[in-house]
Image (cartoon, helix red, strand yellow):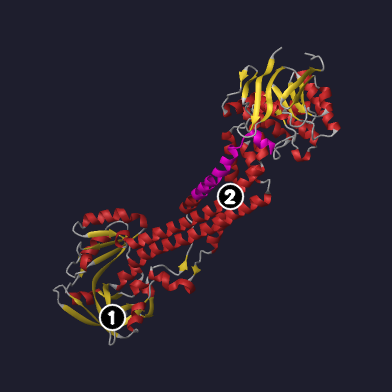
Amino acid sequence: MLLTLAWRNIWRNKVRSLVIICSVAVGLWAGAFIVAVYDGMAKDRIRTVIQEEVSHLQIHHPAFKEDFEPKFVAGDVDSLTAKIVAVPGVKSITARSITRGMMANASNSSGVTVIGIEPASENKTTGLQGRIIAGDFFPEGKRNPILVGNKLAEKLNIKSGNKVVLTFTNTHNNLTSGAFKVVGIYQSINSKLDGTNVYVLRQNLNALLTTPGKAHECAILLNNDDLVDSVKLQLQAIFPDLKVETWRQVSPESDLIATYTTQSAIIMVVIIMIALAFGIVNTMLMAVLERTREIGMLMALGLKKGKLLTMIIFETFLLTLVGAPFGLLVAWATVALTQDGIDISAFADKGLSEYGFSAILYPILSWDSVYQIIVIVVCAALFSAIFPAIKAIRLKPVEAIRQ
Amino acid sequence: MEIVIDAHNVSKVYNPETIPVHAVNNVHLHVERGEFTALVGPSGSGKTTLLNLLGGLDRPNEGKIVINGTDITDMKENQLIDFRLNNIGFVFQSFNLIPVLTAKENIEFIMLLQGASKKQRDERVQTLLKEIGLSDKTNTMPSQLSGGQQQRVAVARALASKPQFILADEPTANLDSKSASDLLDIMAKLNKEENMTFIFSTHDSRVIERARRVVTLVDGRITSDTATFQISH
């Protein structure tokens, strides 16, 4: 009966209740859509990290990443690859030689990370070929080919077909140089990497580093994300002297940004609901004050304070929760309608790519987010109910009836 | 005769520390089961305050009030609410039905608070609606009932909890003469057939004429207490 009474009470002033219900619905729609956009950005960033940058797992010599010294090789490419491929769950692997040095052309120079790859396995693991925007992906017959990122090419004014010189130290700590011909320009989502990473053939780099047949890094793509921890354990057992790391360990900043992005969206929903809660408090206070005499009468007849409190809380919850499903439904529909992506490159292309985010947003409204939003709404309803409910139970029946 | 209400030296003073107003002043009142009593007096004489004290809605500054053998003077708030629920029926001047509940639901509400089963509630509501002559208005909202019909539902609601007595504050004040007469007929019938005790505060001569006992209050004191008819029970 209290629930029935509460439900009918909220419809006494239809316009006022509808305004609050619509406010909750619109607020939740906006909040849930923001969460979906941020969640989509975070998941997209993680996919980019895994599929284009880091892969699921990486293996290095334990000392290699301290100073990128070329002598700290992970091992022999053929041996490493054979052992890794035999582990269940491994989809593809690419073995890389890596060093840091300088790249110069006739007029400019810049610090770079030189990555020596085997094109077929690299493309299978990171899809590098798909990011070529000018020239070709390591065409046959070209001597000392090199791929340069778009940002670095712009900085050094390099075009496909130009020659550049790479300088770095080899395993004997001797400075060594090699002339390379730019065969292609690539562009990834992460503009920072485009400004530092250049790709050459592994055998060319190994010749200069004096590390024939060796690799500094093995990047491993798995069949699915859930296998990361178990495959890591297996690989660590196979290679006890090497360092096996997950993508979260290799790129902790990406994990942090992705987590922070989702959390900041949830904080926005909390702020929206706090703002709405004040509107709900105001409406419920008006409803209580308008019914002072009636509440006094109910208490006179025998309605205990606990039941009165329950009735006011029911009213506040109904007022809040009726709008919530509509807001979430419209948010879900909006997410469904924007599945092909929202292109915001006109507003924030460079800013987003600096942090490795795509300028095309793909909103995702997950059940986890929906549960979190529902918890926030329930908390907001509870918060909104407290003040009006206290006001109601403090009424004295004899004084309330007189009004 | 069984005493239902026993008020000893009851006083109620408003603003005792600033400008004291003695709304009820040293009142002694005994009401026996089955009485049909009118509290009369000019405006401000303390009729409503005395009813509030007898109904446990307000607390006296002095004296004590015993209802059916239970001293309610120092009861805690929640005990008092329970006591009112199970022992006292109220009828207010402005009907005070719950506007969002039907006639049936308004009557049933008290019984729900008492924890009565659906069967008990349905039977009692049907009986009461029949007694007040509104069996055809079961699912009608208060806004669709006339003032007289609303007050009859209020009487049925007061009776629903099977109280020891019913306190009615100016029950006919907002009714036309026909509705007032019908309401008094119903209350008189309940008094006669079910031995229900009624105490009214009223200015209405029609009510005073029907009362079996008339208690007159002036400036918070009882100035006369007259049995106008021999109580038939």
Residue B57 visible in the current orientation: no
Q: Name the residue under label 2.
A: A280
Looking at the picture, how far across and down is residue A154, in whole percent? 36, 81
- Count of numbered badges drawn on the protein: 2
Residue that protrudes farthest toward the top in the picture: B1
Query: What SS does tag 1 mark?
Result: strand
The quarter of the image holding the C terminus of chain A is: top right
- Say what amino acid the circle numbered 1 marks: Pro
Which mark, residue A145?
Answer: 1
The residue lying toward the viewer, choosing from B215 and A189, is B215
| Residue B212 horizontal/vertical position (percent) | 80, 19
Q: In this view, does B51 lie to the left or right of B231?
A: left
Crowd class of label 2 (few under 14; some 14 to 19; many from 20; radius 10 Å): many
For disc 1, the chain is A
Residue at 51% across, 57% down: A32
Q: Horizontally, is A324 left or right of B96 in the view?
A: left
Measuring from the top left, give residue A153's x and y in whole percent.
34, 81
The numbered mark at residue B45 is: none
What's drawn in magenta, residue-wise? Answer: A374-403
Q: Indicate the quadrant where residue A238 lies.
A: bottom left
| Quarter of the image with the N terminus of chain A in it | top right
Q: Nearer the viewer, mark 1 or mark 2?
A: 2
Q: Residues within 10 Å of mark 1 (few under 14, many from 20)?
A: many
